[in-house]
Image (cartoon, grey):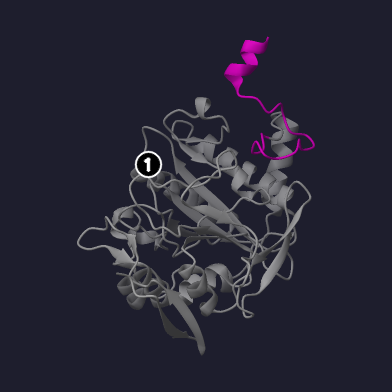
Amino acid sequence: MASPYIEIEVGGRSVRVSNPDKPYFPDFPGRALTKLDVVRYFLAVGDGILGALRERPTTLERWPGGVFEGAKLSTRQDNRGDAFYQKRIPKGAPEYVETARIAFPSGRHADEVAPTELAVVAWAANLGTLTFHPWPVSRPDVDHPDQLRIDLDPQPGTGFADAVRVAHVLRGLLDELGFQGYPKTSGGRGLHVYVPIEPRWDFTQARRALIALGREMERRMPDQVTIKWWKEERGEKIFIDYNQMARDRTIASAYSVRPRPNAPVSTPLRWDEIDDVSPEDFTVATVPARFAELGDLHAGVAEGPRHSIELLLEWAERDERDERLGDLPYPPDYPKMPGEPKRVQPSKARDDT
């Protein structure tokens, strides 16, 4: 029987972990991982997870029943899942849990958790949070992103090795732009690359810059890269998800745990190792030792120089002027945006004509 609770000290605060022996990953190879195992994992990578979240409005992906066969994550259409996204601060949160007020595309507002200390991460893990989804903004200015997040998303027929091939070409492009990019595993089959940017541009402009970068990658790797929004058009390529820079779109943070049986972790990488690793290498059980040896490979995302996206915006203007390449579709829950093309998948559009 699971014990009722224990108290652990985190940064001078006492954090309660209820039912610490509750299996969170019952099918983890070797032995089940418990809630306390997950909390201890986050403490072991504390500087890293806090560096990824500090003062950023953060959606909590909560799995209070753990990750078990058949467990489902709630969606907008079906809120009866075993897990859910918490976009507003939970009721009864301790006084040390601070928030940031953000605006959704609908115009509604919410006060989201904005971690300022490691005790907040431990508290959230006790609530079943495995994956933290921070916005690419900081609490002092929630309308101007300070990160350009490049999501290399393998489509059916492709995998991690394909994402790595694209990442090498992307790194060369970033070098030409004078950008420092920081790669990490997604926790699945893909790769994420973060670029710190000056918080001078709004979400619309940052998204436009990412579209321009994606189009340049398409030109350089036409048989391997796509920025087509509709899945039916992508083919067996790596999709650069430009809508990750739209307002209220987030990526699992570095050091977040993903809800799969082997408890994979979205893990920062060195550029010189991306050919030699596999996403399966990085789990709750293996990442703490790596972190103790290498430290936070994404520290530069928060502490390094920030780059201007002016050249990418010039590329966007060039594409619009010379190639008549305008905006691309937004996610389906967005209001119709200025300049956006018709938001209907091509096969259905043809059926209507």
Q: Is residue 236 above or below residue 144?
A: above
Q: Is residue 351 above or below residue 73?
A: above
Report the quarter where the C terminus lies. Answer: top right
Question: Between residues 144 and 69, which one lies in front from this camera angle?
Answer: 69
- Asked if one can make out residue 301 in the rendered structure from this viewpoint, the answer is yes
Q: Quadrant of residue 322?
A: top right
Q: Residues within 10 Å of mark 1 (few under 14, many from 20)?
A: many
Question: Between residues 199 and 32, which one lies in front from this camera angle?
Answer: 32
Report the quarter where the N terminus lies. Answer: bottom left
The magenta segment is: 328-353
Question: Between residues 312 and 29, which one lies in front from this camera angle?
Answer: 29
Residue named by callout 1: 162
Q: Main secondary structure of the magenta part?
A: loop
Q: Residue furthest top?
A: 353
Residue 240, horizontal then vertical, whole percent: 53, 42
Is label 1 in a helix, a strand or a loop? Answer: helix
Instruction: Tell me which residue sits at (70%, 40%) in the image.
Output: 334
Q: Residue furthest bottom?
A: 12
Residue 31, horizontal then vertical, whole percent: 22, 63
Residue 243, horizontal then vertical, whole percent: 62, 44
Tell whether 331 sits left or right of 70: right
Residue 155, horizontal then vertical, whole percent: 43, 36
